[in-house]
Amino acid sequence: MEDKKTIKRLLFTAILSTTFSIAWSQSTIMPDAMPGIAKNDQKSDTLTEMHLPSSMEDEDFHGFAELNIDNLLSVLEKYNVKEKKIVLAQALLETGYFSSTLCMESHNLFGLRHPSDGSYYTFNNWEESVKAYLDDVQYKYNGGDYYAFLKRIGYAEDRNYTSKVKKIADKLNI
């Protein structure tokens, strides 16, 4: 059974890598609770709905429900996440469009880390990752420019992080 999951993950990663020309980068473990350098600098002109292949929709593989833009937006709405479009863009950037190992194995959509040792959080499903983002990041947000907020709290080490997120958010058709 474990081999079947591994094969699905590898196949899915290969499909997305080919489709989106994902540029992978390695992130070092940092001692803070915020993600390190973003995983992807997408260069596409527009983004529309992105769905996982139907063969990978089983609950066993995802831990909750199919992870796609529509379902993520629904969960962001369910938990009253502020600035949904920007948060969605963060998830897309951090996960390499839902294809990173951290996303697929740890269900961590935002590169969230333990403040004590810098290790990445592991969640039972991707909805838990949204709850953690709300509890660990958004509770600090009191309104205003969300990009400035992300810079102010030191969300990422990459100095261009917010401009990368903005590029993705501007291309989302939601």
Image (tube, rainbow, N blue to C red):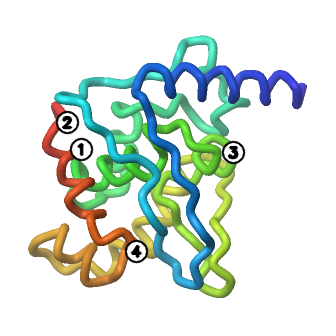
Q: Quadrant of residue 142?
A: bottom left
Which one is closest to the eye, mark 4 or mark 2? Answer: 4
Residue located at (53% from left, 29% from top): 66
Looking at the image, tell me whether mark 1 or mark 3 is earlier in sequence order: 3
Residue 30 place in picture, x, y as percent: 57, 78
Please state which amino acid type lies under the numbered disc 4.
Glu
Residue 108 place in picture, x, y as percent: 56, 54
Describe the element under mark 4 as helix, strand or loop.
Answer: loop
Q: How many marks?
A: 4
Q: Quadrant of residue 155?
A: bottom left
Which one is closest to the eye, mark 4 or mark 3? Answer: 4
Q: Quadrant of residue 165?
A: bottom left
**Residue located beneath label 4 in the image:** 157
Looking at the image, tell me whether mark 4 or mark 1 is earlier in sequence order: 4
Nearer to us in this view, 142 or 119: 119
Which one is closest to the eye, mark 4 or mark 1? Answer: 4
- Look at the numbered discs 4 and 3 and tell me whether their residues touch, using CB distance below 8 Å: no
Please state which amino acid type lies under the numbered disc 3.
Glu
Describe the element under mark 1 as helix, strand or loop.
Answer: helix
**Residue located beneath label 1 in the image:** 168
Residue located at (35% from left, 39% from top): 74
Nearer to us in this view, 20 or 110: 20
Marker disc for residue 172: 2
Residue 148 place in picture, x, y as percent: 17, 75
